[in-house]
Amino acid sequence: MIDQAIILAGGLGTRLGELTRSMPKPLLDISGQPFLEYVFWNLRRHGIGRVVLSVGYLAEKTQAILGDGSRFGLDLTYIVETEPQGTGGGLKLAVDLLDDEFLVLNGDTIFDVNYLDLALGLSSENIAAMALRQVKDVSRYGNVQLEGGQIRRFCEKAAQGPGVISGGVYALRKEALDFLPEGPSSIEQDMFPRLVQSGRLGGQVYNGFFLDIGLPETYRAAQILLPKWKKRPAIFLDRDGVLNTDHGYVHKPSEFDWMEGAREAIKFLNDKGYLVLLVTNQAGIGRGYYEETDFWQLTGWMRHRLAETGAHLDGVYFCPHHPTEGKGKLKVDCQCRKPKPGMIQQALCEWDIDMENSFVVGDRTKDMELAQAVNVPGHLFCGGKLLEFVRPLVSDLFFG
């Protein structure tokens, strides 16, 4: 499971004029928060918790504002370019901090792709995978020739008409850095053409939200578009009986049997742009059958298995209480045990959720009562293929 990203944020941002005279472009204010905070949010919800930030211009200011990343839920480290190194040089400087597999993003753009799905493009042949965008006219950019998931050629800015272009998000194996020269260099101009020649660069087309804040007009547009993009509907999923067979107080991987199509259903929801939030009663903790640490260990195992199919849970909420059989302080008539709405209320404090288009999927009456309590539709799952159950319930989301 890929869980590290490097963000290239060392540029001067000269096209933004006075805006970047005293503030690095990736830290410009977008509707009350630094642009990079939106990037961090998108990484964190995919389970990517460690970030290397490659900085140059006004590096000390960036470090002072962002700190160690803990307030964003991240482990943030820095590589400082004392002289401009280009996108490739910034990567080379960070080589000792990078995992064997990692993501690469630009610090002034957002391309909302399924990062875990992109990482699946790494293989024994491909040591790099590029997220591609479909555009109506490639003449401004040059286009990419893609055949069977393999990038065969980069074309210069000449042809007109529709095509695919780089979206500026990449999954790399560390050995791909061997294709860069020493000193300042460019990922796009130095590394990728050599990878194409060797047949080791994959590509995948995505239709997610894209924004580059590098121009005054796109920076102004970002003030409206980014908050709109971040607000999205959620699917509140029960666990036992929906994602896995309910054997009773499941708390070990050896007891966990995925429902048919469950992982595929979660990936489908991820790809559609919904938040996927798990809401589960775990009275076995309160009854003393297992510990909270067991729950989180199983959840970590689930996340690894989901990542193998390019899927993720955006958030996990659980109730450890029981009103009559709980032990000690866990014997309480709480507000979080379904059908009471406490878990969803907590989620609403942590996410900007479009509740008008959200819904609950569960296998019991209490799940339907929970949906009623928060005034969203509830859909009762009675077994079968979960993907086929959720598919007709969702819509395509378009941002901006």
Image (cartoon, grey):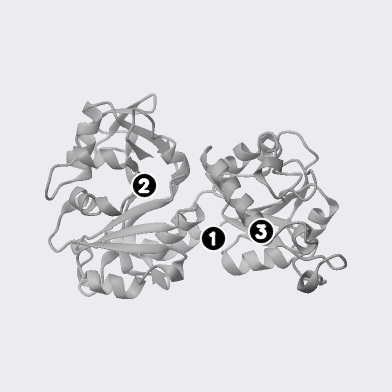
Camera-near label (2 vs 1) is 2
Q: Residues within 10 Å of mark 3 (few under 14, many from 20)?
A: few
In this view of the protein, which residue sits in the foreground, 138 or 388? 388
Q: Secondary structure at mark 2?
A: strand
Vertical position of residue 204 compared to residue 344: above or below:
above
Q: Secondary structure at mark 1?
A: loop
For residue 123, which quarter of the picture? Answer: top left
Image spot of residue 107 (x, y percent): 31, 58
Residue 263 visible to the viewer: yes
The residues tagged by marks 3 and 2 sit, at their Cα atoms, a distance apart of: 36 Å
Image spot of residue 206 (x, y percent): 43, 40
Which residue is located at x 20 percent, y 37 percent?
179
Left or right of residue 171: residue 301 = right
Question: Which circle's residue, 2 or 1, is located before the other in the chain?
Answer: 2
Camera-near label (3 vs 2) is 2
The amino acid at mark 2 is Phe
Question: Which circle's residue, 3 or 2, is located before the other in the chain?
Answer: 2
Left or right of residue 66: residue 198 = left
The amino acid at mark 1 is Lys
In this view of the protein, which residue sits in the foreground, 58 or 35? 58
- Give the label on residue 102, or none: 2
Vertical position of residue 194 compared to residue 169: above or below:
above
For residue 367, which quarter of the picture? Answer: bottom right
Residue 114 visible to the viewer: no
On the image, numbered disc 1 is attached to which residue?
A: 231
Left or right of residue 309: residue 299 = right
- Numbered disc total: 3
On the image, numbered disc 3 is attached to which residue?
A: 356
Which residue is located at x 30 percent, y 75 percent?
64
